[in-house]
Amino acid sequence: MRRNILWFLLAFLGIGLFMSFQNCSSGFRAKMLAPVNAVQATTNNPPGGGSGVLDLAHWHGVNVDTDISDQDLDRIRRLGFNLIRLNMNKQPLMHKQAPYDFDEVAMARMKAIIDSCRLRGISVVMDPHTTPGTEKTTTTLNKDKLWREPFFQNLLIKLWDRLSSEYANEPTVIAYDLLNEPSTPEQAVGGPPILSWNDLAAKLVRHVRVNDPKKIIIVESSAVHIDGVQLDRIDSVPYLKIPKDDNLLLSVHMYAPHQFTNQGLRDFPTGIKYPGLIGGQPWDRSALREKLNTVKSFADQNHLGVFIGEFSVSRCSDPVSADQYLTDLLDIFSGNEWAWAYLSYSSKNVWWSLEEPVSEPCGMSDAGAPSREEILSKFLEKQ
């Protein structure tokens, strides 16, 4: 009888040790398989995620504005995209004239789009895109009042106070993009004090975290002036001071070289080919990778994931060149495990539309070249 009891105890202890080893082993494997740029997800069904881990390499999206329809969202999902960056520049969330109240119509439109995305399993990066104290609705300028008058910075804080309170528990919204394309001026000797994007970003993060302690916050780099020279937002990345927070993403927009990607817009001439000599410099895949190495190095040093919030090529560019440029960028993004959102999906945006024929609006012959949509779809099929 005593011998039987002894065998029973030994068997019980053996099973316990085996189960403990299995649990430790499973936990170890989970950590080993987590992507390098993984961040903690706050959604029930994040792009490419699972068990609360968000895989940035599977954030594949498009920029949209308030003209987007349910039919457009259906098509976006069918094409293989899993998120949108929702730009509110056509319907700013705050009026840009005094008394700078919230625009409740715009707020309602944004909510309706988010509701539609929830039904389709599309995640949303919330992007107010514009704010009082800025001249344009598409970007910021270094002459904007936002950088000189605390009153306007406080309005942006007020906006994010509301948004983070209302959407803290909305799983469809996976990230907050604090400010589209900051552009801070250089402090002039004896001039009025310049308000820092680094300081404002830190304030915004603190205010958001009061209401929403978990959702991802996207911080874009600001174009800065150094010794009278304005750097673009990619070359300005080393001057960004990352707020103290455990769930941030670094974001830049990739349009380099502008002489190629902006053909036909404003004063940019057409007829420029890629790869080739552009703006007096050779541009090819290696040059694109070198341009983005500033972002990669900074992100690696600061243990940040990266979200390319915009990239595109004007439809006035040579179709074959555009195909190669986008293919090279997508391969670089994929190799770095970066998230991205193409600019844009909108039939009303003749220059950047994903879905429109490449021969419009410049009257070019597309010679059977694929549309931007086909280029990105081919990439998504391989993922």
Image: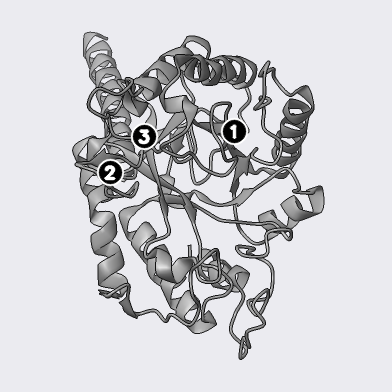
In the displayed structure, 170 sits above or below 222; it is above
Of labels 1 and 2, earlier in sequence is 1
Nearer the viewer's eye, disc 1 or disc 2?
2
Distance from Cα at disc 1 to Cα at disc 2: 22 Å
Image coords of residue 95 (percent x, y): 68, 25
- Determine whether, in the image, residue 108 is placed left or right of residue 56: right
Q: Nearer the viewer, residue 41 or 350?
A: 350
| Secondary structure under the numbered disc 1 in the rendered image | loop
Label 1 vs 3, first from the N-terminus: 1
Quadrant housing the N terminus: top left
Please give the label number shown on residue 184: 3
In three-dimensional space, the C-alpha distance between marks 1 and 3, rounded to whole angstroms, equals 18 Å
Q: Nearer the viewer, mark 3 or mark 2?
A: 3
Name the residue rendered at 27%, 11% in the picture: 5
Amino acid at the residue labelled 3: Thr
Q: Residue at x 34, y 45 (%)?
A: 35
Q: Which residue is mark 1?
A: 128
Q: Residue at x 59, y 72 (%)?
A: 315
Q: Position of residue 224 (x, y in %)?
A: 30, 40
In the rendered structure, which amino acid carries the disc numbered 2? Ser
User: Viewer-nearest of labels 1 and 3?
Assistant: 3
Judge by depth and name the residue closer to the eye, 125 or 55: 125
- To which quarter of the image does residue 239 belong? top left
